[in-house]
Image (tube, rainbow, N blue to C red):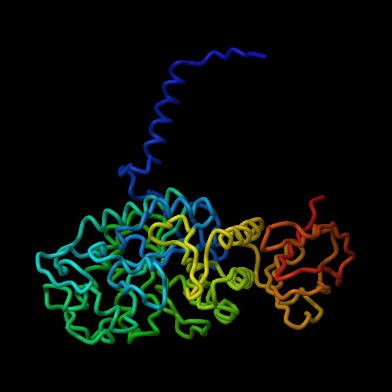
Amino acid sequence: MNHFIRINPYFFLSFILASVITALSFSPTSRAADASPTAPLALNPANPHYFLFRGKPTFLLGSTEHYGAVLNADFDTMRYLDTLQKDGMNLTRLFTGAYCEPSGAFNIAKNTLAPEGTRFLCPWARSDADGYAGGGKKFDLGKWDEAYFTRLKDYITQAGRRGVVVEVVLFCPYYDEGQWALSPLNARNNINSIGDLPRTDANTLHNGRLLETQQAMVRKIAGELKGFDNIYYEICNEPYFGGVALDWQYRILDTLAEAEKDLPRRHLVAQNIANGSKKIEMPNPGVSIFNFHYATPPEAVSVNFGLDKVIADDETGFKGTGDEIYRQEAWEFFLAGGGSFDHLDYSFTVGHEDGTFELPAKQPGGGGPALRKQFRILRDFLGGFDFVGLKPDHESIKSPLPKGTTAHGLSKPGEAYAFYFHGGAKLAVNFSLPAGAYKVDWISPKTGETESSKTLDHAGGEATLAIAFGEDVALRIVRAKP
């Protein structure tokens, strides 16, 4: 049946204009809105173990290329960001360019942090003098490379349009002479005679004129990125290596705070604490996110949960190229109460910015489309709860687990329970629940399929919940609606 509707011509014209404006504002080539006017990513006031982003409770989950998206001019950033959006990821990390790596470092094939020759970009402009160790002209530490900052801002703009938060990592230790030999901050690579010192002194307060250069870089980046809502800063990646000094980290933190002092709301700052776990004894009040690497089992969450800040597992790897070990790490970390997880995904390379590079056996970590699909199952599972209202639950399971099986869970007692079990078994757990009717679902973290589902009318006390599973299984219990 055809219907004729009379349309007000003025309303129609207004609609067309609004559509054109919207299309322009989301055009990949538009430079009109290179920063969001909204408040930046913040700790969630209702539960500071999570975030508030664009008015919504948020946890961050990423599967990230090896941090060279901006400094590697050959890397197709738009293809990469499109893939993150398609795969449901909302976090990525980037290194600013004070650090890069030689080809072959850490046995990484097609390392995005190892750009080819003159394709390395950083905050400082090239000079007219030959002699940079990586190829091409040396750097002038007194002159900014505006093309680099254009690329940086465009990257963060495009990430924001896709709902992706960018962790901007300001510095990184020089693990060995190979990285220090390529740094623009090494006196051999700049025309300013700055940085004539051992690599282990570079990120300390006794580094001469280098400190002024580092602080100037922080101020410049802070000024360029001041309007973006989808960033937070990390002071230094893995500062527990390469001689990085704590007082130097705090000087950088103070420099960033001073640079942002006039902003209505400053950006969050992360501090990388340790590989694995460590109890934080004297947290700096300027830090809102505490980053750990390879944080499995997730003890870093439990020992630091009382700080009421976000605890993050900020890098994974060195456990082979298989999916299960990293899927387990992600599920356990979030179900222990973590608020951010970033998998180091080596399937993203130059030429494979869609994350399809087939990993060689000696690659130090995993990644790929199948694993990102499993991460999305985790995102949807946790996102299906009012997760801000959940807290770590160490009390609901009342019976011993089978040998080799682990459990981590969050709950709001009597309302909602989210648990993850790893270690194949025929599982039967005595689960403490208040009286009421509950919907009970067992879900495969690998496929997302519901393995078993039932409604439980419970008189209160312990209920026996059973499932047979393979590698791992997730349990969702929610009070049934009347």
Q: Residue at x 34, y 82 (%)?
A: 175
Q: Residue at x 38, y 48 (%)?
A: 37
Q: Is residue 463 left or right of residue 293?
A: right
Query: Across the whole image, how many numbered discs are drawn on residues?
Result: 0
In the image, residue 133 lies at what x, y percent?
20, 74
Q: Is residue 424 left or right of residue 98?
A: right
Which of 351/158 is in front? 351
In the image, residue 12 lies at what x, y percent?
46, 20
Which of 270/144 is in front? 144
Q: Residue at x 52, y 85 (%)?
A: 279
Q: Quadrant of residue 148?
A: bottom left
In the image, residue 461 lies at what x, y percent?
86, 71
- In the picture shown, does residue 266 fall above or below 26? below
Which of 70/358 is in front? 358
Q: Residue at x 46, y 21 (%)?
A: 11
Q: Is residue 2 left or right of residue 246?
A: right
Residue lying at the far left of the rendered structure: 128
In the image, residue 258 lies at what x, y percent?
28, 68
- In the picture shown, does residue 213 fall above or below 200? above
Which of 344/164 is in front? 344
Check the picture and name the quadrant holding the N terminus: top right
- In the picture shown, does residue 155 fall above or below 65? above
Q: Is residue 8 left or right of residue 242?
A: right
